[in-house]
Amino acid sequence: MDPTEMRYLEEENGAMMKTFKDAVTGFATGKTSLVFIGVEQLVQNFRAKRDFFNGAHITMTKVARTHY
């Protein structure tokens, strides 16, 4: 049998192909979720630092006002 004729006998939606497609879909979903979580962590960390510095500035201003 020709290799060109063999492709008609192969299953396109066989168990192995479904498993492979599901694995690729799961991998892509997981990777997207990891990127989203990473960006969210970076933004949260940046905001925490900014809030800390702003809070320190406000506290120092209040202390300076009460001592003078």
Image (spheres, grey):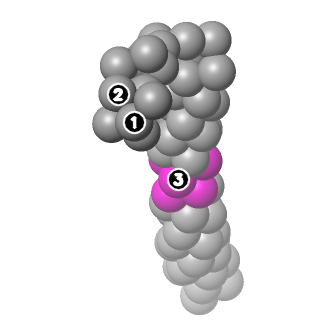
**In the figure, 38 relative to 52: above or below?**
above
Residue 30 drawn at (x, y percent) = 60, 38
**In the figure, 20 relative to 58: above or below?**
above
Q: How far separated are the C-alphas under marks 3 and 1?
A: 46 Å
Could you tell me the amino acid type at mark 1? Asp
- In the rendered structure, which disc, 2 or 3, sits on the residue that comes first in sequence? 2
- The residue indicated by pointer 1 is 2
Could you tell me the amino acid type at mark 3? Val
- Residue name at image x 63 percent, y 11 percent: 15
Q: Nearer the viewer, mark 2 or mark 3?
A: 2
- Residue name at image x 33 percent, y 36 percent: 4
For the N terminus, the quadrant is top left
- Is 8 or 20 nearer to us in this picture? 8
The numbered disc on residue 35 is 3
- The residue indicated by pointer 2 is 5
Judging from the image, what secondary structure is the residue with disc 3 in?
Answer: helix
- Is 34 or 44 nearer to us in this picture? 34
Residue 33 drawn at (x, y percent) = 55, 40
Query: Range of the magenta residues?
Result: 34-39
Q: Is there CB contact under 8 Å for labels 1 and 2?
A: yes
- Is 51 or 30 nearer to us in this picture? 30
Residue sticking out furthest to the front:
1
